[in-house]
Amino acid sequence: MEKLPYHKNLVRYLFHRRLAGSIQIFMRLYHGTLHQEITRRQTQEKLFSANEVARLAMDIVTGLSMLHTRKLLHRDLKSDNIFITFDSGRGIAYLTLGDFDSAKQISSDAVAHTVIGTPGYVFVARRTASEPEMRER
């Protein structure tokens, strides 16, 4: 994390310190998570506009591109790990990818084979024919 360049769409690492048996990581403080904002808007029945969705998706894709350019896979991308910075009018200024605990550095020709992430968010790329979703109907 400390080797990543500064970019508004990647969490800002500040410093760390070692304690007995643990490491404390300090990062920029954000206003909340995308999950919290989605939940708030659902409660208020206020939808994201198409322009907002496009702009926010671009922030996510830009952050992922920065990681992938450096041969890093996030492996736990979900709305809880996407942080929000609000502008002065309380609109979303930009999104920032964070929580790189599960991230993996790969070599240029390697393929990640490990399935890791938060249950319920993990994309299952392969299924066996014995599973109900794959049986012929």
Image: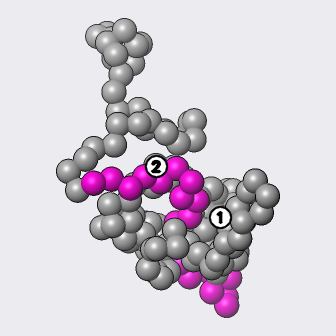
Residue at 42% across, 69% down: 63
Image height check: is 132 above or below 2? above
Magenta region includes residue 108: no
Which residue is under mark 2? 75
Q: Position of residue 54 (x, y in %)?
A: 41, 69
Q: Which residues are magenta?
A: 87-107
> The disc labelled 2 sits on which kind of residue?
Arg
Q: Is residue 39 visible?
A: yes
Which quadrant holds residue 38? bottom right
Image height check: is 8 above or below 114? below
**Along the line of sight, the residue nearer the viewer: 90 or 33:** 33
Q: Of marks 2 and 1, which one's residue comes earlier in the chain? A: 1
Quarter placement of the C terminus: top left
**Residue farthest left in this picture:** 109
Label 2 Cα neighbours within 10 Å, binned few <14 / some 14-19 / many ≥20:
many
Which residue is under mark 1? 33
Magenta region includes residue 93: yes
> The disc labelled 1 sits on which kind of residue?
Thr
